[in-house]
Image (cartoon, rainbow, N blue to C red):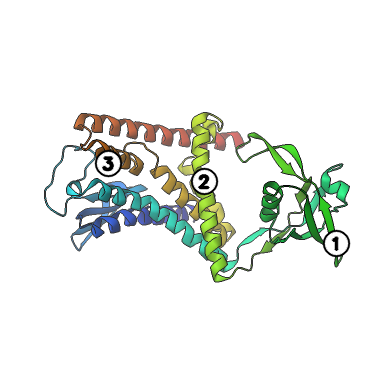
Amino acid sequence: MGTITFLLVLSFLVFFHELGHFLAARFFGVKVNVFSIGFGKRIFAKEWKGTTWQFALIPLGGYVQMKGQDDTKPGLVEEGNDSYNTKRPWQRIIILFAGPFANFLLAAILYFAIAIMGATTLAPQVGKVQENSPAFKAGILPNDEILRINNTEIKSWEELGKIITTTQGSLNFFIKRDNQFISKTINPYISDSENMFKEKIKKRMIGISPSGKIVNLDLSFTESIVYAYEKTIFASTMIFQGVQKLIQGIIPSSEIGGVITIGKVISDASESSIIALFAITALISVNLGVLNLLPIPALDGGHIMFNLYEMIVRRKPSDQVFMFLTIMGWVILGSLMLLGIYNDINRIFLKE
């Protein structure tokens, strides 16, 4: 069942990505010859409105084959108003960007659905209080519920942390304890901490940790839209930063996961709840969008880079340069996929 869920989710994400390219191409009048889910040998195909819609044997990706675009034939020229290579560079950039954008849009839709169905978060309830910390000295106790800081209502632990780290000066905490309401003034201190990438940072803190209590967020329609937007932006930023840290060597290459890891995560999420499945699908969709925007030839980002070059210098890169960079792009992608699979297999054997 987990494998089936994995294949369905992956096919859905690929379909949405390629649909973005397809709709943008058709908007500019470009003929799409093939819309494929998967690579390799065709196992099912149907022609509809001039496009062959197909499923291929290897379900780890997909593509739209437009008239006038073929990475294996960089010098290909197909004339006509319905050809990709007769369109202006800015039009081609929009067609290329439409795929990743579709992934970001899908993630936002899924996060919105999560908000409507019942998003959950850590409650702003104190678990442990660090001895001799500002919170300890102010008299904060375990199980205290933090209702407001200064004039800002607090609904989640995330909001609590954001206020503490970004607000200057002392903070006025309004607390609920044993059905009584108490006010405490706390002066945060700067302390050593770690970010999500295990980097050492300095951070304003008061010395408390969450109790672990989970609460449902009661969000209105407008608040759900804001929730979806913020979650999509946060996920995108986190993945962009993750790629940057990986290139800088801060994140070790052993952290790269392959299709086995993705499959297991999706399988586990599907067995947990529909909300968990939506959340991991949204995160993978953002991941797909971000990775496709990397300036690697053979990816959308690489093709966007070629078109930007054409816009600036008023000529296309030579066929030899285009082919060389494209091959290098496939080598990089293939190497990353093999590294991910190698890491997956290592994790399996290490667990055993």
Q: Which badge, 2 or 3, is on the more N-terminal residue?
A: 2
Q: Is residue 264 above or below residue 272?
A: above
Q: Is residue 164 above or below residue 313?
A: below
**Kind of residue at disc 2:** Thr
Where on the picture, by quarter, is residue 192? top right
**Kind of residue at disc 3:** Asn
Residue at image mark 1: 182
Instruction: Name the spot of residue 68 as percent of width and height, x first.
Output: 18, 46
Of 267 and 75, nearer the camera is 75
Residue at image mark 3: 307
Q: Identify the residue at horizontal 51%, vertical 31% (top origin).
A: 253
Instruction: Name the spot of residue 138 as percent of width and height, x first.
Output: 86, 50
Of 82 and 334, nearer the camera is 82
Residue at image mark 2: 237
Q: Is residue 232 left or right of residue 167?
A: left
Residue at mark 1 to residue at mark 3: CA–CA distance: 61 Å
Q: Which badge, 1 or 2, is on the more N-terminal residue?
A: 1
**Disc 3 secondary structure class:** helix
Label tally: 3
Residue at mark 2 to residue at mark 3: CA–CA distance: 25 Å
Q: Identify the residue at horizontal 40%, vertical 32% (top origin).
A: 335
In front: mark 1 or mark 2?
1
